[in-house]
């Protein structure tokens, strides 16, 4: 699958900015470079970064609306650092042992140091953001608070039955906050009027939902060779995802009982994972999930029409939207 | 022991500011209010806060140098939030089960949520600091980074023999950074010249060392009825403290072997704690520690003479310095 231009065009600049922000000499900075994929396990330079979606959106939006890339870069890097600090801590909270095919930070350096370097990354994000201006900084820290609140809801959901509405409220915070922030920061750095910043936020919200639901689908039906995770990973981890919320809302009788029984277990066996997937498929959950992704992406396209983007910018963003609908990792 | 004026005079204002900064409605904010001692385990208002040393120093310094308390308060609150987020995470890292006589956050809400609310508190600190101006904000985030680096050194020291110099380098970051920051932020909010900010930082460094070494002494010889922790707690926790560094530097023969043997153990028994204390007392470690506290406090007094404080301000700070030498908790 070809990557959309937005995800390739700014990549080198973001990598350079990230490397600069994490150039400290002590072990802690080496751990952070390892985490983001700028270095491998032996400390040699690597290119094993993620999609860099959020910082790419900052730079794209800023540039598209007349801002300077150089001015936006610290904000973009700050946002990626916030996203990555949350991943370091998420991996501890979820007991995840690998990320992008490598051992997670806690797995390699222990939980105590993993907590600590996550904290460091959050602080370094603020250091980066110091130059972007007070408004953009406010938006970033507001989004950080929201994301953490969303993670708190998610942790609090543990062992509870979660409906679709609670799920969406959680996703708007946990995933949506940083994607909304990407667009809004880009706009603020380009000094657009507050109405445009608002519209950018609306588009970000729709994209955030679509992005997360696609993630949820990949967490259950994703191809292991592409995602790096076995099928049904999110079921094994008892992750609160849209497929589970839909399945629980739809299932009755024996299927409802089966879902509740499996999700009440301390540990979920491979056979249970298969049984849950069978129920989900019987209930057409996957198809509904895909329809939901399409729905929110269509809302995003609709919002895009409101924005003062160039023809080229509109095309680029539409290409990204189309990619998000079908991405396999 | 009567508390010095600096620790009582600003207390009500700081409490109010903290309460405002943590007024969110969700569970996460209730956990944070519980952690700082603004609420008890049942969520009813409480007054079980710590000494509030750092924010008191911000307000005192700002006021003393001609700044406005109202302007300094968000900075003071931000600093206390940074200190407290680090305590939430420290308690996880050190397996500490109680703080100020109450169960620690991770003990009550689990490690995952404790990591998360610590993250939230760090982000809320930045939210608070948004109003204090760019320079004060820079100083705060710089101090946060330093503190976390110090914690990283501390974690990295685990299982290693640490000399007095490495110990001091660690303390200057882990404890010194926030105390230096308190004075410097106070100065910046009062808009003093950069030379004064520098001198404030120097005094903070000396006070930070004295404060931490006193803490180290209390961690071994403190009165359980006052500190809330049994004698020798820091030995049982294998904490890298000045008494240990001094003892290891001085001990020879059998005593050296005993210290290394005990500190190499997975778990330290009560009897081992007693044996280590006996060695320390034989080596005059406690006395040296107390001399070190006096030494750094004398350096602080010396630095104080350089600062453009009023007579009353000088007296107040000297009273605090004298208190830090003999505090029992």
Image (tube, coloured by chain):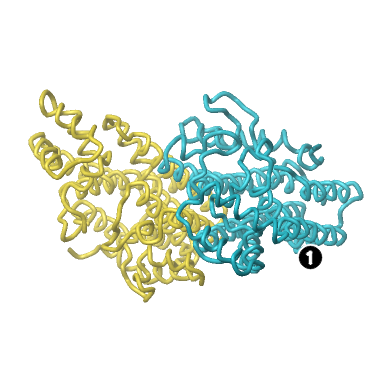
Chain colours: A cyan, B yellow
Identity of the residue drawn at 59% across and 37% down: A36
Quarter of the image where one finds residue A301: bottom right
Question: Residue at the bottom extreme?
Answer: B44
Q: Is residue A21 above or below residue B134?
A: above
Residue A272 position in % (x across, y down): 55, 52
| Crowding at mark 1 (Cα within 10 Å: few <14, some 14-19, many 20+) | few
Numbered disc 1: what chain? Answer: A
User: The residue tagged with tag 1: helix, strand or loop?
Assistant: helix
Can residue A21 be seen here? Answer: no
Q: Is residue B52 left or right of residue A217?
A: left
Left or right of B104 on screen, residue A42: right
Q: Nearer the viewer, residue B285 or B113?
A: B113
Residue at the location (20% across, 65% down)?
Answer: B2
Q: What percent of the width, then of the height, locates residue B9?
A: 33, 68
* Picture quarter with the C terminus of chain A: top right
The front one of A198 and A249 is A249
Residue B189, above or below B149: below
- Side of B305 relative to B249 (left or right): right
Q: Position of residue A147 (x, y in %)?
A: 59, 57
Residue at 57% over, 49% down: A126
User: Is residue A123 shown to the viewer in this render?
Assistant: yes
Q: How many marks?
A: 1
For this rendering, which residue is in front, A39 or A222?
Answer: A222
Residue at mark 1: A195
Quarter holding the N terminus of chain A is top right
Residue that sits furthest to the front in the current view: A254
Residue toward you, B168 or B219 = B219
Q: Is residue B33 above or below residue A293?
A: below
Relative image position of residue A65 (x, y in whole percent)? 82, 51
């Amino acid at each position: 699958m070809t990557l959309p231009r937005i995800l390739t065009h700014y990549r080198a600049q973001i990598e350079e900015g990230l490397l600069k922000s994490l150039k400290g000499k002590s072990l802690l900075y080496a751990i952070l470079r390892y985490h983001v994929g700028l270095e491998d396990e032996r400390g040699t330079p690597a290119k094993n970064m993620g999609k860099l979606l959020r910082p790419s959106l900052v730079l794209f939006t800023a540039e598209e609306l007349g801002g300077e890339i150089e001015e936006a870069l610290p904000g973009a890097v700050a946002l990626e650092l916030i996203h990555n600090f949350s991943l370091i801590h998420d991996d501890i909270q979820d007991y995840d042992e690998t990320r992008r095919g490598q051992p997670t930070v806690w797995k390699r350096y222990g939980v105590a140091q993993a907590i600590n370097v996550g904290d460091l990354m959050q602080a370094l994000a603020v250091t980066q953001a110091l130059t972007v201006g007070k408004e953009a900084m406010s938006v970033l820290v507001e989004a950080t608070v929201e994301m953490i609140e969303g993670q708190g809801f998610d942790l609090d959901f543990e062992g509870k039955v979660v409906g679709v509405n609670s799920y969406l409220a959680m996703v708007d915070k946990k995933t949506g906050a940083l994607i909304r922030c990407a667009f809004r920061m880009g706009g603020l750095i380009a000094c657009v009027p507050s109405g445009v910043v608002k519209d950018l936020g609306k588009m970000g919200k729709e994209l955030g939902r679509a992005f997360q639901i696609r993630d949820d689908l990949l967490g259950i039906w994703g191809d292991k060779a592409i995602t790096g995770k076995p099928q049904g990973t999110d079921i094994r981890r008892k992750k609160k995802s849209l497929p589970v919320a839909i399945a629980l809302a739809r299932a009755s009788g024996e299927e409802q009982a089966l879902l509740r029984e499996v999700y009440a277990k301390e540990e979920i066996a491979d056979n249970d994972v298969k049984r849950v997937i069978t129920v989900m498929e019987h209930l057409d959950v996957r198809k509904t999930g895909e329809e939901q992704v399409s729905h929110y992406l269509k809302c995003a396209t609709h919002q895009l029409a409101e924005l003062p983007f160039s023809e080229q910018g509109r095309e680029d963003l539409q290409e990204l939207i189309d990619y998000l609908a079908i991405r396999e990792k």
